[in-house]
Image (cartoon, helix red, strand yellow):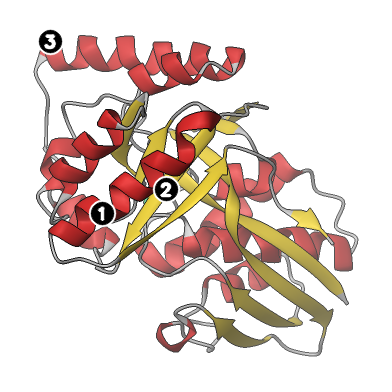
Amino acid sequence: MVTVRAPATSANLGSGFDVFGAALGRPADVLHVEKAERTTIEVTGVGSDFIPEDPDGNTVGAVAEALEAPAHIHIDKGVRPASGLGSSAASAAGAALALNELYDRGLTREELVPIAAEGEAVVSGDAHADNVAPSLMGGFTIVRDDGVTQVDASIPVVTCLPEIVVSTLDARRVVPDGARMEQLVETVSNAATLTVGMTRNDPKMVGMGMDDAIVTPARAELIDGYDAVREAAFESGATGVTISGAGPAVIAACYKSDRRSIATAMIDAFERADIDARAYQTEIGSGAEIV
Ligand code: HSE
């Protein structure tokens, strides 16, 4: 039996739509995996009622098939599905790491990324790697068609998860078809600033680089209270605020000393919009680990 803890992740970080991702210290999924004649799946924990246990409909079933590694996989969900915190990616990344170990496949974490992304395709219809890459590799990741660039960044963050659901499909439908040249220039500037900020572990630069005028404003319409939550986070010291992944979670970069007040301010702002929310005070940190 192999047990793996696979962390939540935040994709996009504003300026890096479908490219940037970051591993979060918490929450996480925990997977207990043992060899079996055929793959069976058991899901417990947060939101488990909404996750199919049929291997054909579950993200980890596709991973087991891709690795030709049948197993009994117990997923204890810590990452709420449809949260924008890479819930299915955490399960897929955890299963890929566990099965690689259990069946001695000898693949590197980077080589496991496309395999875990196959699992993502089962849920979202598209093999996005911007959540599985950081969940497997940790830190800050840049996903390219030909591989992943990883930086061992450590930046304090707050993620605030409201009790609403935004489907990735809806969030992708509102993405604009194009952008103006000045928006593209601004995006390159922000993405470059964020990337350098990650290499320097500089919360101010990372926050500045999270601004995005193309995708985030369209998606913000799907999250009641988003503008007020963003403003409240900035007023409490956040260096940057944006939608986490496809939402509805909101992520704020900050200095560690401001984390608690930012978390409270974000929860209170959602509450003023009549939406319950919880916040995780955490940091960009390690990838999945065998425990
Ligand atoms: N980059 C993706 C999106 C992440 O924002 O739609 C969700 O899988």
Q: Nearer the viewer, mark 2 or mark 3?
A: 2
Q: Is residue 247 visible?
A: no
Quick one: label 2 or label 3, which is nearer the N terminus?
2
Where disc 3 sits, the SS reads helix
Residue denoted by label 3: 182
Q: Which residue is depicted at the point 53% across and 70% down?
A: 59
With respect to residue 62, does 223 lie above or below? above
**Quadrant in which residue 166 is drawn:** bottom left
Quick one: label 1 or label 2, which is nearer the N terminus?
2
Q: Is mark 3 within 8 Å of ligand 1?
A: no
The amino acid beneath tag 1 is Asp
| Rendered location of residue 13, percent (x, y) | 38, 34
Nearest to the observer: residue 129 or residue 243 = 243
**Quadrant in which residue 170 is drawn:** bottom left
Residue denoted by label 2: 159
**Which mark, residue 268?**
1
Where disc 2 sits, the SS reads strand
